[in-house]
Image: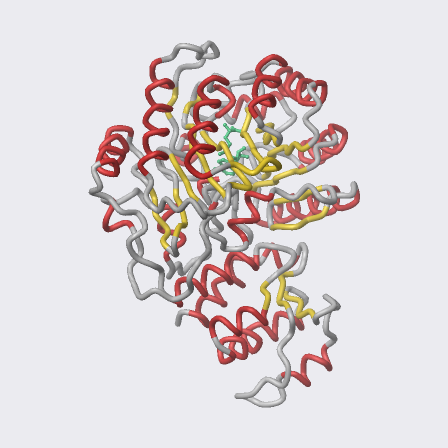
Amino acid sequence: MLKSSFTPIFSTFPAKPLSPKPLPNAIFSCFTHTAPTVRQNASPNTPTTILPPPTSAYIHLPFCRKRCHYCDFTIVALGSSSNQTEDDPRMINYVQLLCREINAMKAENKANPPLETVFFGGGTPSLVPPKLVSSILETLRLKFGLSSDSEISMEMDPGTFDAKKMKDMMELGVNRVSLGVQAFQEELLKACGRAHGLREVYEAIEIVGSCGVENWSMDLISSLPHQTPEMWEESLRLTVEACPTHVSVYDLQVEQGTKFGSLYTPGEFPLPSETRSSEFYRMASRTLSDAGYNHYEISSYCKSGYHCKHNLTYWKNKPFYAFGLGSASYVDGVRFSRPKRMKEYMGYVENLENGLVDSCESTSSAQDMATDVVMLSLRTSRGLDMKSFGEEYGSSLVLALCKAYKPYVESGHVVFLDEQRRAMAADELNALLVNEDKIERSPAYIRLSDPDGFLLSNELISLAFAVVAP
Ligand SMILES: C[S@@+](CC[C@H](N)C(=O)[O-])C[C@H]1O[C@@H](n2cnc3c(N)ncnc32)[C@H](O)[C@@H]1O
């Protein structure tokens, strides 16, 4: 069964990764484990591929009014009434620290290309005063350069911004909003411990529209406690009516150490059964596809041309910077996560300034990289590009993957595609794998089917791990 996959490998992926059972590779440790001391943190091994410099940056702004009952992200709870954040010293000090981290970052190469995407994730970035956001963007601009048509996304919570704040953010260059709605039922918002109600949801949608934000996304969570199919149907219908250009649908992940973790057991009432959760996933896939959204990644849907460029960086296994408390970067082949506690993060920045930390000092092994590529690309509707995978990691792995997935092609969970992205028929497939140790012609792509393959993604990705990193 699919488990939640809210990004950032990624929103911290640098959202959350899928969690297939055996996790042999470096990628998960950055997103799921407490950050160890900085030097241990970088994944060791021999250099393999030379990666280009990043053109994406994730910025973690951890402040929230309160912690939601399902949330285990790295946040700082300010208190429910804290909408007036203009002069909050906690924010001012944090942003100063963050800018120091950006400035202290090594690998200054004036020939590097400018940033193409910036993602302000949280936490609740929309709580941060525009003048502080401005100083972060200015610091990034001076350090790396910022492309004039860069995608600048910001996670925004209902009830934390008005039209003036929205316009101020747009003037700074924010051109993509990710609105955390989660549900369209007052009782579910309350049960989630959200700091806003339904009225603020509608107000936020209205503000985003009236301010002319063209590119905006809505986050929803399925499988919430006491959520019925009728409620989920209603949330999907109201989402479609609000006309966002992008929708992210996450299956609730019950995290240890959260309020939900202490109250509920997955699969048991008042949480839905696995069968019902799967049905929720199918309903989302069907409703959003029927409404003209392209299901381009396990949890992501977009209108044509409105995929999230920043998140595609993660799914294409391209490098990205990350700055701020608990954030995870991927630079020079190294996945590196920053401390999650403020005091340790302060120490980390100081050490960075004094040249005592090098977050780019070693690279991932070829095996780490191959498993990352498989896991990330199988999340997408594009799938795994077998030609470039074979060139990079060898034809024997291509053969092994094709053999492992053949039964799942027959069961309809996996699709082999040719160069024209046409699904290969069973007889073509048999012709490919005529004998045990030779492949006549590799399929151009392997992808998971929608929704059945995506629903089985944990198992299918684990299977690939067993092949790539036995
Ligand atoms: C970094 S969070 C966004 C935080 C933002 N303050 C908000 O509440 O919208 C990104 C998204 O992850 C999803 N999310 C967070 N924790 C989750 C969990 N335990 N299970 C499923 N989805 C979750 C929510 O949909 C959330 O909007």
Residue 41 position (above or below residue 243): below
- Camera-nearest residue between 294 and 58: 58
Q: Where is residue 177 in the image (x, y as percent from the top left)?
A: 60, 29
Q: Position of residue 401 (x, y in %)?
A: 53, 73
- Camera-nearest residue between 152 and 68: 152
Q: Position of residue 348 (x, y in %)?
A: 25, 36
User: The N terminus is located in which quarter?
Assistant: bottom right
Q: Residue 350 vs residue 28: left or right? A: left
Residue 424 position (above or below residue 122): below
- Camera-nearest residue between 31 and 314: 314
Direction front: furthest residue = 110
User: The C terminus is located in which quarter?
Assistant: bottom left
How many tags in the picture? 0
Q: Residue 208 vs residue 372: left or right? A: right
The colour mode here is secondary structure
Residue 98 position (above or below residue 450): above
Residue sitting at x 47%, y 44%: 16
Q: Position of residue 28 (x, y in %)?
A: 40, 52
